[in-house]
Image (cartoon, coloured by chain):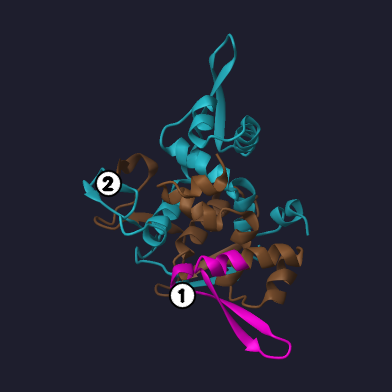
Chain colours: A brown, B cyan
Amino acid sequence: MKWDDLAAQPCSVARTAAVIGDRWTLLILRDCFLGVKRFADFQARLGIARSIVTARLNLLVEEGVLTRQPYQALPARYEYRLTDKGMDLHAIVLAIVAWGDRWQSGPEGPPHWRRHKACGCDFTPMTVCSVCSEVVTARDVEIRENLG
Amino acid sequence: MKWDDLAAQPCSVARTAAVIGDRWTLLILRDCFLGVKRFADFQARLGIARSIVTARLNLLVEEGVLTRQPYQALPARYEYRLTDKGMDLHAIVLAIVAWGDRWQSGPEGPPHWRRHKACGCDFTPMTVCSVCSEVVTARDVEIRENLG
């Protein structure tokens, strides 16, 4: 099976992986949430070929995750900003950070701390049920097909 | 910069992306959470080359996300099971599913429904603060470096 066929399957993991299932894309999204907006800044932070950055940004614009807006006319320069669809990727990025903090940090601990502004405390993200607000783990979930 | 250099940087997104930042890996993990354990089943479900499946499974074993255990001697056959570190990826997979359900589904709705066994209701996962239990969005988070 080719990737394009698979991404067209009725599976939300495949459909999402088709947008963000790439290492560089995940790092570009990380930088978007840190406030990076300009091509040159993305490229400088990642230190990779322009063509890789261009391809990833173009896909994210095509998929409606980023918008591309001019901020300078001569020469033409553009800023990339998260759309609502892009902002909604935050839960994925936060879950990725939390796992990395927990399992891939050395004895020096996680590289960054995250503070929840509303309560003022350093926190880790937790995944809960939208109905009963209890924590949800893999063993708590039953899946069934949407038969329409 | 090469990927290996970047993955060594003090960033939990990069460190996690080094393990799961690949489309096929995300689909293999999806299947792990659906109970798939055997090489032939992973390969049949994805319909891709053996070499791709082998490389992804080997990386996940090396990284301690899956264990590889024999279930048959002649010929030797192995099962792949999620470790605790692997089970903990569920929050990421669930966040990926939720985003795909919300943004990549057509008018027919999400391809699957998920029921929270504890409360018996169909649910969507929500990300909350571990301290105050309130919902956390991108705008609620302040990041600072761990200076040791």
**Can you tell which of label 2 and label 1 is closer to the viewer?**
2
Of B111 and A34, the residue lying toward us: B111
In the figure, residue B144 lies in which quadrant? bottom right
Reply above or below: B39 against A1.
Answer: above
Q: Amino acid at mark 2?
A: Arg
Q: Residue at x 30, y 47 (%)?
A: B114
Of A105 and A70, the residue lying toward us: A70
> Which badge, 2 or 1, comes first in the chain's sequence?
2
On the image, the x and y values in percent for residue B1 come to 78, 59
Magenta residue check for A59: yes
Reply above or below: B85 against A56.
Answer: above
The kind of secondary structure element at disc 1 is: helix
Q: Residue furthest left?
A: B120
Which residue corresponds to mark 2?
A: B115
- Residue A110 visible in the shown view: no
Q: Quadrant of the C terminus of chain B?
A: bottom right
On the image, the x and y values in percent for residue B90 come to 44, 46
The kind of secondary structure element at disc 2 is: strand
Alpha carbon separation for disc pair 2 and 1: 29 Å
| Magenta residues (range) | A58-86
Q: Residues within 10 Å of mark 2 (few under 14, many from 20)?
A: some
